[in-house]
Every structure is written in C-alpha cells, then in structure tokens.
Amino acid sequence: MRQALGLERNIRLIMAYKGQVCPFFGLMLLSVLHHFRNPMSQDQLIILRNKETGEVYYTRKNKRKVERKIELKKYSKKLRKRIVFKESKK
C-alpha cells in the first residue's frame, strides 16, 4: 500500500513539472509518462477469434508498425489442438 502511494505521488509530480525543472528531482521531466501507461489499453487491444469454435483470445498490437490483420496459431480448448485465430472487430 505504501509503495502504491509513493508511485501515485511520483506520477503527480511528473505531471505537474512536465517539461520544466523539478525542484524535488533537480532534472527536467519530459516524456516519462509513457512508462506508466497501461500496456493493454483499449487502443492497443485486439481480439483474436476462431470462426469454427467461436473462442476468443485478447492480445495487443502495435498499430503503427503492423498494418495487416494478425493471424496466430493458439491452443483451442474445445478442439484440444493448435488452430489459427484471426483478428476480428471489437
């Protein structure tokens, strides 16, 4: 609990002094906030779905680098083997 409060305080300090010299740390805080971003945020989240079984996997994708639809082989619990899951709409 104490660590969580410390992290929350640090995030507030970074947001308050972004692009300025912080009197507490004595350095310029520019773009440190991207370290605190949730890696499974909704803009990176994609759905992998198999049409045969209707099973769903959730994963993330860098949309700046990968423009095509993703197809991955994942384990199907219903068929008990690895099958192709394709990216689908949310």
Image (cartoon, rainbow, N blue to C red):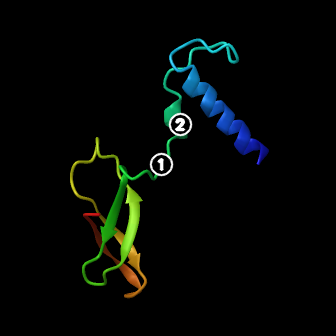
The answer to which of 12 and 41 lies nearer the viewer is 12
The answer to which of 11 and 72 lies nearer the viewer is 11
Horizontally, is 37 left or right of 46 in the view?
right
The single residue placed furthest to the bottom in the displayed view is: 79
Q: Which residue is mark 1?
A: 39
The single residue placed furthest to the left in the displayed view is: 68
Above or below — where is 69 with respect to 27?
below
The answer to which of 5 and 66 lies nearer the viewer is 5
Tag of residue 52: none
Q: Residue type at mark 1: give it.
A: Pro
> What is the x, y in percent for residue 84?
29, 73
Mark 1 lies on a secondary structure that is: loop
Residue drawn at 35 percent across, 52 percent down: 61
Tag of residue 35: 2
> What is the x, y in percent for residue 10?
66, 31
For the residues labelled 1 and 2, the Cα–Cα distance comes to 9 Å
